[in-house]
Image (spheres, rainbow, N blue to C red):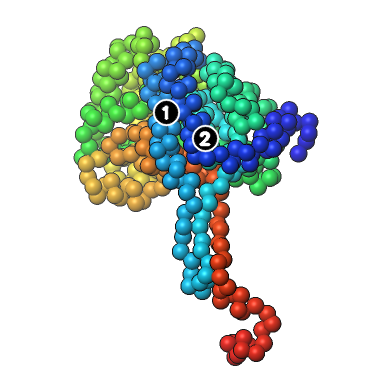
């Protein structure tokens, strides 16, 4: 480890402090969480809304619902469970070890790094931080450079609430991330793209640092002909257009039972109009694409699909100066189009049709395991068939996005969409090591069977 690393000193300070933080009581950890809750819910609520509006015109109410509320909820859930999570968990001891007792201690991992993306910067930086604090760790946070107003505000909040020996926030771009990744952290919690996830895992392997990788990918939505199509389309437009589609678990594309297509297109147009008016550009409920790089990536992907024969069924307008892209529905997309190859991460929805449910499932399985898979159906057999014959990080039946909000459910992907889980006790476990303790009280069978293996001991195996 190079002492020239710009974060070496900070890392060393946290390392020196880790046992002090690790030995804090659950009450002390709760007090810290409450300080964070107060900052998010009261002191900085308005400033957070303003920062996200400045970054990509995120509507204030959406910030409340998708950024502040989930973290505050995670804090409340953690506060009400932390005492139980920190209790030594007694487990049975085999009869052969009579005279001993066994228990599990959820000990802190130590010095942790949290690297977060730009799409929900508050939620995905402070959410994992809640679990890290609950686990008794010291933490360095590295938010994304793409939402500079929000990152700057988070730096201010962290500086105000915590001692840097315990929790510090470092702002910066890829070089900052790369420098941090050289350090021998005890755990890295990364949220971002699968491509960068691989870089993080490679860097972590150098020190055998454990990782949680919350990644992305293409999340399919399967709709069958038993579903309530009107309700399904309303929820899909909501899932696809919240945050202008820049959501890791947004429905990436739709697999629709063939006969439903004309009705789906009609309902899509109708729901977009209901949510965002005839002209979504003027709607105060609709965000912008985060920057011109991502705007160009999306508009190019749409042009690419059009040039390969796809049809824009609804929307399609955009404005570069404002990074605005209208909610857009596209059909007839060939497999070699960027829209079907890469995660879309924007308000463009590919519509694919299928005849038999087996074909839809086959299509999903021919691609990487998704972070989320959605099913709109009233048919239990279809629902069970899809769940049983596909693999995904999470599934929501007859809605989308909601699975993120239940802290009793683990949140995360599988293979290409992620490794490890977050939220509630699952997040707490990512930031703790389950240490086994066996305590001997009186002499046991093993002690009697120690060498030399002679006399009566030898006779046991004769
Ligand atoms: P990203 O992977 O480009 O960046 C994430 C973080 O990594 C940022 O802080 C960035 O500065 C840093 N980074 C970027 N390149 C790096 C490199 N070469 N080396 C080291 N660090 C680097 O992701 P993004 O564009 O910020 O976010 C979008 C992606 O994140 C999408 O794929 C989305 O699906 C995924 N995502 C996943 C979840 C989840 O919970 N699973 C949540 C939100 C977003």
For marks 1 and 2, give the one nearer the viewer. Answer: 2
Q: Secondary structure at mark 1?
A: helix
Give how far across and how far down residue 359 sits, in percent: 34, 45
In space, the residues marked 1 and 2 are separated at their CA atoms by 18 Å
- Could you say which disc has been placed on residue 28 in the image? 2
Taking 127 as reference, is 105 above or below it?
A: below
Disc 1: which residue: 72
Residue at point 55%, 57% (across, down): 436
First-in-chain label (1 vs 2): 2
**Looking at the rendering, in which quadrant would you find the N terminus?**
top right
Residue at point 57%, 44% (across, down): 108
Residue contact between numbered discs 1 and 2, judged by CB atoms under 8 Å: no
Give how far across and how far down residue 134 sits, in percent: 50, 38
**Looking at the rendering, in which quadrant would you find the C terminus?**
bottom right
Q: Residue pushed farthest front? A: 442
- Residue 383, visible in the rendered structure: yes
- Could you say which disc has been placed on residue 174 in the image? none
Along the viewing direction, whichever of 336 and 29 lies nearer the viewer: 29
Quadrant assignment, res 286: top left
Residue at point 59%, 22% (across, down): 159
Q: Is residue 425 left or right of residue 380?
A: right
Q: Secondary structure at mark 2?
A: helix
Which class describes the residues within 10 Å of circle 2: few (<14), some (14-19), or many (20+)?
some
Taking 248 as reference, is 385 above or below it?
A: below
């Amino acid at each position: 480890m190079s002492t020239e690393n710009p974060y070496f000193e900070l890392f060393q300070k946290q390392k020196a402090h880790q046992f002090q933080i690790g030995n804090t009581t659950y009450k002390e950890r709760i007090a810290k969480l409450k300080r964070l809750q107060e900052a998010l819910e009261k002191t900085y609520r308005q400033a957070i809304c303003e920062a996200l509006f400045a970054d990509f015109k995120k509507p204030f109410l959406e910030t409340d619902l998708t950024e502040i509320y989930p973290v505050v909820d995670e804090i409340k859930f953690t506060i009400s469970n932390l005492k139980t999570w920190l209790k030594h968990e007694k487990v049975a001891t085999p009869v052969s070890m009579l005279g001993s007792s066994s228990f599990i201690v959820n000990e802190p991992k130590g010095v942790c790094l949290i690297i977060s993306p730009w799409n929900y910067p508050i939620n995905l930086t402070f959410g994992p931080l809640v679990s890290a604090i609950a686990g008794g760790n010291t933490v360095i946070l590295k938010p994304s450079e793409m939402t500079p107003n929000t990152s700057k505000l988070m730096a201010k909040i962290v500086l105000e609430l915590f001692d840097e020996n315990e929790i510090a926030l470092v702002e910066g771009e890829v070089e900052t991330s790369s420098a941090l990744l050289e350090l021998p952290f005890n755990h890295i919690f990364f949220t971002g793209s699968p491509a960068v996830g691989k870089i993080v895992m490679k860097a972590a392997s150098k020190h055998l640092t454990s990782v949680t990788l919350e990644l992305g990918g293409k999340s399919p939505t399967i709709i069958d002909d038993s579903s309530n199509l009107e309700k399904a389309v309303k929820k899909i437009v909501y899932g696809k257009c919240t945050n202008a589609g820049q959501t890791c678990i947004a429905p990436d594309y739709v697999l629709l039972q063939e006969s439903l297509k004309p009705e789906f297109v009609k309902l899509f147009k109708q729901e977009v109009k209901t949510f965002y008016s005839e002209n979504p550009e003027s709607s105060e409920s609709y965000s912008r694409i985060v920057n011109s790089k991502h705007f160009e990536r999306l508009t190019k992907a749409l042009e690419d699909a059009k040039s390969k024969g796809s049809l824009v069924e609804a929307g399609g307008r955009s404005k570069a100066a404002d990074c605005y892209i209208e909610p857009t529905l596209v059909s007839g997309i060939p497999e070699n189009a960027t829209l079907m190859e890469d995660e879309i991460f924007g308000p463009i929805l590919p519509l694919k049709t299928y005849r038999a449910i087996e074909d839809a499932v086959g299509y999903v399985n021919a691609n990487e395991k998704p972070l989320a898979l959605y099913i709109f159906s009233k048919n239990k057999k279809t629902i069970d068939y899809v769940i049983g014959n596909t693999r995904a990080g999470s599934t929501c039946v007859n809605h989308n996005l909601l699975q993120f909000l239940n802290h009793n459910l683990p949140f995360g992907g599988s293979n290409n969409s992620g490794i490890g889980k977050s939220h509630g006790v699952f997040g707490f476990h990512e930031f703790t090591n389950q240490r086994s303790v066996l305590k001997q009280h009186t002499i046991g069978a093993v002690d009697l069977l120690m060498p030399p293996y002679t006399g009566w001991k030898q006779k046991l195996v004769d």
